[in-house]
Amino acid sequence: MKRDLISIEDLSDAGIASLLRHAAAFERSGASQALQGAILATLFLEPSTRTRLSFEAAMHRLGGAVITSADPQASSSAKGETLADTVRMVDAYADVIVVRHPAPGAARAAAKAAKAPVLNAGDGGHEHPSQTLVDLYTLEREVGRLTSLTVVLYGDLRYGRTTHSLVRALVRFGAKVVALSEPGLELPDYVCARLAARGAQPAAARIRGLDALFPGEPPAVTLFGFPESRGGGAGVWSPSDGEVDAVYVTRLQRERLPAARADRPVLPSVDARFLAVPAFRRAIVMHPLPRTSEIDPKIDGDRRAAYFRQAAFGVPVRMALLSWALGRLHLDGGGPPAPSAALAGAAPDGPGGCGEPACISVREPSSAPAEFVGAADGSRRCAYCEGAWR
Ligand code: NCD
């Protein structure tokens, strides 16, 4: 079976832990010639700096070669070529393909069209699994463990794809996740359904001292965690002083916001006052970057500001990921975890299709013929973007 990484659900818990151990070894050892002769193609149909350059730096550090198409206007997609056709060509030129595309579900469509492994570098507002591996590596390095963390997700949680992959992984490792979203930009239903299938139900939460930072009514705070880890019974959960391990900040994803949504954040930016909230005393501040106004640059010098170190970890983590995808590295328990079997796909048995207009199966059915998967709650979801099936 080829080693695609389309969703963070494609790796088991043991596989993730093993990949991060290999990343640590790459961070210690630096360069090698392990991938000499292999070619990486980076196919980026959406803007990127860190993700593309860290994949490319990782390939160079392993002695491999890189070919890239990073400007949609300069690629054949501007001439109307379908994603599937583009990928079939790239497949003939490269041994591993990293894809970024504005349509949710595009990475799965690309993986179907290619014989080479495909790594998802962000498919619209859906998922960004290699960023999650970088985020988990950062948490392990900076907090000292991966299990039983308390993490606050802060910002645009609806269109920010990094949190969609991260929250699934965190919950799998037993985290309490506190979602503090921009009003109206809460985690999408399909992500919450996936968390519920893992036993992490939403509950009300409150962070002492945070309300004072909001000029008006503070937005609702939701906790996702396992009932036994909430500790407070059925009431409103509050983290104790110093309990939060990380605050993960995301920018407003202006390129994906509906026209009716003001493009100014409502949440206050993360600054010295924010970090003075007692629950955040020890919390590292993470951000997939680029930041806009959601983190005050004045806190860059605070030892808790981990975002630039996080970006640097992208290289060793992607060295491990490329080595795995190219079959040069074995992961313990490397196969997909059991629930992913539900994503194996099923042919539609009648009319119907994805209800998400941006989905690749709606925008480009020739690249992604409509397909559903059964969800744990008995409903059907689009096999590409996990949108509701209609
Ligand atoms: C993120 C992305 O592209 O989703 N950036 C990244 O890959 N480091 C986050 C963002 O653009 O806000």
Image (tube, rainbow, N blue to C red):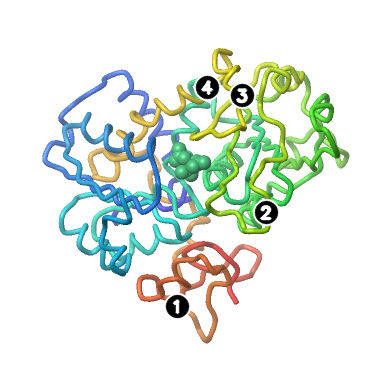
Residue at 58% in and 39% down:
251
Label 4 sits on what residue type?
Ala
Which of these two is toward me, 158 or 236? Answer: 158
User: Which tag, 4 or 1, sits closer to the chain's start?
Assistant: 4
User: Which tag, 1 or 2, sits closer to the chain's start?
Assistant: 2
Say which residue label 3 marks: 296
Secondary structure type for disc 1? loop
* Disc 3 residue lies near ligand 1 with CB under 8 A: no
Name the mark on residue 347: 1
Judge the density around disc 1: few (<14), some (14-19), many (≥20) Cα neighbours within 10 Å: few
* Disc 1 residue lies near ligand 1 with CB under 8 A: no
User: Which tag, 2 or 3, sits closer to the chain's start?
Assistant: 2
Label 3 sits on what residue type?
Asp
Secondary structure type for disc 3? loop
> Looking at the image, is mark 4 or mark 1 nearer the viewer?
4
Q: Quadrant of residue 316?
A: top left
Secondary structure type for disc 2? loop
